[in-house]
Image: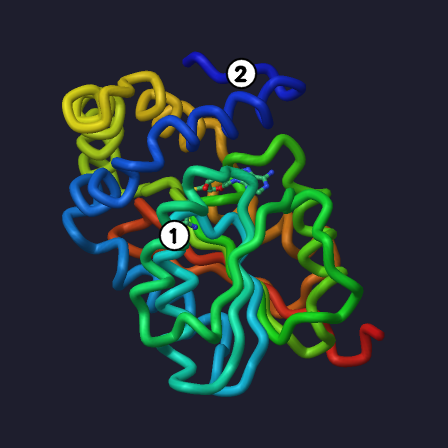
Amino acid sequence: MSLPANDQKEHYVHEMFNGIAHRYDFMNKLMSFGLDQSWRRYAIRRAHISAGMHVLDACCGTADLTLEIAKSMGQTGQVTGLDFSEQMLAVGQQKVQKSEHRTQIHLLQGNVMELPFADHTFDAITVGWGLRNVPDMDKTLQEMFRVLKPGGWAVSLDMAKPTLPVFKQVYWLYFNWLVPLLGKITAKRKSAYQYLHDSARAFDSQQQLTQRFAKNGFTHTNFHNLMGGVVAVVEGQKAKQNR
Ligand SMILES: C[S@@+](CC[C@H](N)C(=O)[O-])C[C@H]1O[C@@H](n2cnc3c(N)ncnc32)[C@H](O)[C@@H]1O
């Protein structure tokens, strides 16, 4: 396994996503067999997002989840997408400009570990495949908790750990061998997709991440496996009396 040391992770991750931004969406579809968008829609439902809300999509990348959130709210509501990779944001901005929801979406460059928002700003927060990439997950969750309104839900959609015998062995083989090869062929970045495997291996299990949500103040914490636990949605609520 070749992961950057924690003090170099931020720089490594920033450069990596800048480097693969132009192929990111294509690789996502390929690796997930086109299922990524349905997983995003499920995460939106778990975040209890409804019309008229102001939602933060942290680590928004190329804005697929951001756009899907705006779509789910119809013509009302606002979504702020935040990411630190200027190249990922540039790809996202192009898609936002073409969308009928462009006036409801605001993309912003920033660090999810130091969110540039006041306390209790957002009705709901999503983070798609983001927590795995930050050097300090607790600090990130504390920031998400701080800017969430009391009663609001935060959800993480990310790689998880399948447990079913045989299926899990086949999955890790696919992930360790085929995904980096696809990354080499299509995005010319084998190392970035090797990182994807290595970071998923090192990441919290869905149970551990659920506990981490609780440790950082969230209540009603839970997780939901998707595709046999290859991916999971972890959720938590900021209690209503938390002002
Ligand atoms: C795997 S991509 C996920 C993009 C998007 N959420 C999606 O659903 O496809 C992870 C994103 O997290 C961003 N990221 C990683 N660490 C970050 C940090 N500390 N602050 C802000 N963004 C960060 C990266 O730039 C990248 O765009």
Amino acid type indicated by mark 2: Pro
Residue at left 29%, top 37%?
A: 22
Label 2 Cα crowd, 10 Å radius (few <14 / some 14-19 / many 20+): some
Residue 4: mark in rendering:
2
Q: Nearer the viewer, residue 173 or 242?
A: 242
Q: Residue at 32% of width from left, 42% of height from top? A: 162
Among numbered discs 1 and 2, the one appearing first in the sequence: 2
* Residue 154, horizontal then vertical, whole percent: 58, 64
Q: Secondary structure at mark 2?
A: loop
Q: Quadrant of the N terminus?
A: top left
Q: Locate the C terminus and report the quarter of the image it occupies.
A: bottom right
Picture quadrant where residue 111 is located: top right
Q: Is mark 1 within 8 Å of ligand 1?
A: no
User: What residue does disc 1 label?
Assistant: 92
- Left or right of 79? Residue 175 is left
CA gap, disc 1 to disc 2? Answer: 26 Å
